[in-house]
Image (cartoon, rainbow, N blue to C red):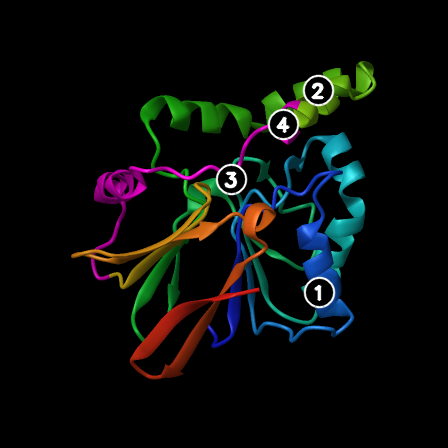
Amino acid sequence: MLQGAVFISDAHENENRDSLEKYIDSILNKSIKSPSQLFLMGDMFDLLVGEIEYSKLINQNLIEKIDSLAKKIPIFYIEGNHDFNLKKVFKNVYTIPFKKQPFRVQTPKGDLLILHGDRFEGFKYRIYSKFIRSCVTLKVLNFLDKIFKYKISKKLLNFLGKKDICKKWLDFEDRAKERLNDYPIKDVWGVIEGHFHQGVFLKLEKVNYFNLSSFACERSYFVVQCIQSMQCEIVKGQ
């Protein structure tokens, strides 16, 4: 990982939210400093699935902008539960699917585990995740969606657009500690994930834990600054 790497999570881009597109535009037109690397931590779109034609159609403009930026700097897309099977969607972006998370990267301080945040949920969720990412399932859904003039996708997007994604959890620290028991954190300095939208840092006995804010809610991102060989921290940016 390079100094100046930027992490953005859960932008949930849709027709009413365009914070991510504005951020990408600002880098492309050089109105803000370009990061050395960009980590998109999943759920960057309310809906973007490789096999679902409508989801690509409505997001094509931002897809092209992200791909254009990826020609200039390394972009790693950690797939989430709203955006997945993206290998063929982006030509220049490194996509990290659900099954390959957590993604391990090296820093001067030690290794970091990077994941969207839903990788170690319960058994039922894992079954659901495997089913919904199945190419067969998605091709059938896309076929039906096209027959009904994309009404399935539009109804899903309408539902997702009404969800409250900015709420805070009073017991989040306890939940995080419990979940981390299932994470492969041996010899790991830190864990960075999104998904829960909490924007908290926990310095725990076994590992440092960062849960990123939703970019849709706070318009904030995190910049990794490794100034000296054993000094590495994550600072909040605007």
Indicate the secondary structure of the residue bearing disc 3. Answer: loop
Count residues near mark 1 (Cα–Cα under 10 Å), then give few for <14, some for 14-19, many for 20+. Answer: some
How far, Cα to Cα, is label 4 from label 2? 11 Å
How far, Cα to Cα, is label 2 from label 1? 31 Å
Q: In which quadrant of the rendered image does the N terminus lie?
A: bottom left
Tell me which numbered mark, 2 or 1, is placed earlier along the sequence.
Answer: 1
> 97 or 54, which is in the foreground?
54
Magenta stretch containing residue 169, yes or no?
A: yes
Tell me which numbered mark, 2 or 3, is placed earlier along the sequence.
Answer: 2
What span is colored magenta in the figure? 159-187
Closer mark to the observer between disc 1 and disc 4: 4
How far, Cα to Cα, is label 2 from label 3? 22 Å
Position of residue 117 measured from the top left corner of the image (x, y, whole percent): 41, 43
Residue type at mark 2? Lys
Residue 162 badge: 4
Tell me which numbered mark, 4 or 2, is placed earlier along the sequence.
Answer: 2
Q: Is residue 32 left or right of residue 206?
A: right
Position of residue 149 measured from the top left corner of the image (x, y, whole percent): 83, 19
Tag 2 residue: 155
